[in-house]
Image (spheres, rainbow, N blue to C red):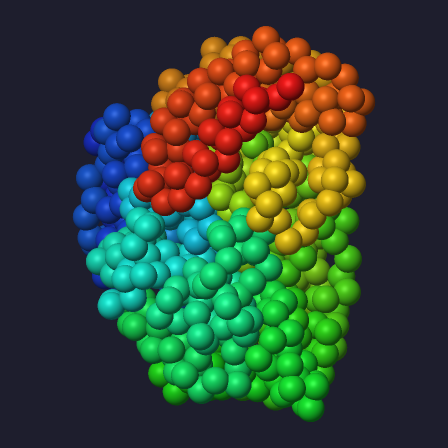
Amino acid sequence: MYLIPAPARVQKREGAFVVSYETWAVLDAGCGEKAGRQAQLFMEKIKETLGYCPMLTRGSAKKGDILFRQDDGMEAQSYVLEIGPEGVTLSGDEKGLWHGMQTLLQILEQEGAMLPALQIEDHPAIPNRGYYFDCARGRVPKLDWLKKLADRMAYYKLNQLQLYIEHSYLFRGMTELWRDDTPLTAAQIMELDRYCGERGIELVPSLSSFGHLYKLLSTKEYAHLCELPDAGEKPFSLFGRMAHHTVNVTDPDGIALIKSMLKEYMELFSSRQFNLCADETFDLGTGKSRKLVEEKGKGSVYIAYVKELAQFLIDNGRRPMFWGDIIVEFPEMIKELPEETVCLTWGYAKEQSDFSAKAMQEAGAVQYCCPGCATWNEFIPLYRTAYENIRRMCAYAGQYGAIGVLNTDWGDFLHLNQPEFSAPGMIYGAAFSWNAQVPAFEEINRQISRVEYHDSSEKLLQILSEAEEQGAFRWYSACMYWEARRGVSEKYRNEEEIAGLLEGAADALEKNKKLEEIKLSLYRQIRTTDGRDRERIWPFIMAAEGAWIFNAIGALLYSAEQNREPVDTAWAWALAKRLEIWFYYYKEVYRQVSLQSELSRMEAVICWYGDYLRDLK
């Protein structure tokens, strides 16, 4: 039996308890209203698992009952679960009770109605354990998928969710901002906030407010507030969206606009926190604010703007958060921000160092450590990279006194991979922020394969992790090549630079042999996967096929452009058809969880490659 996250202490005992159709579940007198509602949610899950569920009541427990006992004098978020032949007792503070219910549910799902006797004493290593999902740069997920995400988060004892928003919320009157998108609405946000709250998850608003405002500051209405001149006149660029645009801090209308957006958005949430982002302000000091930055220094200009927004949030009863990539260059300036401000210290490298977390602790910052799921720009996520990065960052959180871990799932370059693929990375973050004793990569993958995917062979994650080194013409390179050949790239301008995008494709055919093996292994996994999760295997097969196709495209282009070999036009046309067939099914998978969002932009990339292959001479 696997429990994720692993409890702090488990003691096995003799005997078992049978959860029969006659069993009663009892809320004791100390259980509050929320505990009662959550117990009802728990009962619904038991019915899904066993086909029936105990009767729920309030009062005094009897022999053979499942007793829920709320004790707010216990350590925050802690619980004690005792299973014996004569009954089950779950004790904890309000939040701990909910976490204990998830542990009990995992036991029920694996053991059925016969629960082994044991005692579990458990509490989290890190109090705030969050997940951060990008809703801005490719995908806007459907509300029902976001609710499923909240359910999964609760199951693994995560307690904070943030959705990254740049332009994909329907701000009142700002029609030019979202007219070509499928933005989240106020009603959807409020519904999700309620849903998360019932499941012990704080939905924290997150909104770009300094850099990463490409869409806002490209509109005719607001382009004049951008740091760069002529911000709305250049053609759309995937790279440009990542690199630009930043608010012109010398124009008071700019910060007034941002404050109005923060104010409108914050009112939708019950959370008293707000992530104002303020990361990657690459343009600061390069255009309209150049003179101010030269006079006062970039650090001073940056911190003054963030300080004003942070104080605005505090004045409106919110605790500000912001990304720490800029301030780590001048950590001593953290003292200029309101003391309750939370610095979100991030780093996504496989061998991420402790430099930033240590620097911010020494500067006196209140911080979260923020790793990443290694999903962005990948057909199949880099699960080993994610494991190593998350393991390190969770350790740094403990070492440098962070009050939280926020595990990120970004959508750079049109959010290629299916959001469902992030489940293992999300679970790594949940497991390692709850219990500092981290299982080996192979062991945690066996556990996730069984608990999350109901894979009796426990090999699914092992198979998927083998895809990590098989990208030869990866999505980033494909997008950059697309922009370069269309003459809209600011990074790859000459033939030598463009040729560099194809260098990885030299060994594409060898890597494709491995991808074929992975696809066959995934087909075999259907047999060992529970029926309710078999539909989750097909998107992985589609992802492996997509990686294979782009490797093949890269190999063909490399051969034609670098080796100057004649183009096999029959193969090029066949590859174009294979790409287009794949994309037909990719769109079907995409629409299972996402609104239309920016699917048309991805369609433009795919169609261009189909035409380009047919035009090769």
Query: x%, y% of residue 435?
Result: 61, 51
Give above or below for 586 relative to 484: above
Q: Which residue is at the far right?
A: 563
Quadrant hosting residue 259: bottom left
Query: Image point 44% across, 41% down: which residue?
Result: 601
Query: x%, y% of residue 201?
Result: 39, 57
In this view, the residue in front, 399 or 177, is: 177
Q: Is residue 409 visible?
A: no
In this view, the residue in front, 71 or 193, is: 193
Q: Is residue 345 left or right of residue 497?
A: left
Q: Is residue 373 left or right of residue 153?
A: right
Quadrant hosting residue 11: top right
Query: Image point 64% across, 61% down: which residue?
Result: 346
Query: x%, y% of residue 573?
Result: 55, 14
Image quarter (top left, top right, bottom left or bottom right) of the C terminus: top right
Give above or below for 613 relative to 104: above
Give above or below for 72 relative to 386: below
In this view, the residue in front, 236 or 369, is: 236
In this view, the residue in front, 13 or 174, is: 174
Quadrant hosting residue 82: top left
Query: x%, y% of residue 231?
Result: 50, 66
Q: Which residue is at the far top?
A: 570
Q: Which residue is at the far front?
A: 617
Q: Is residue 580 visible?
A: yes
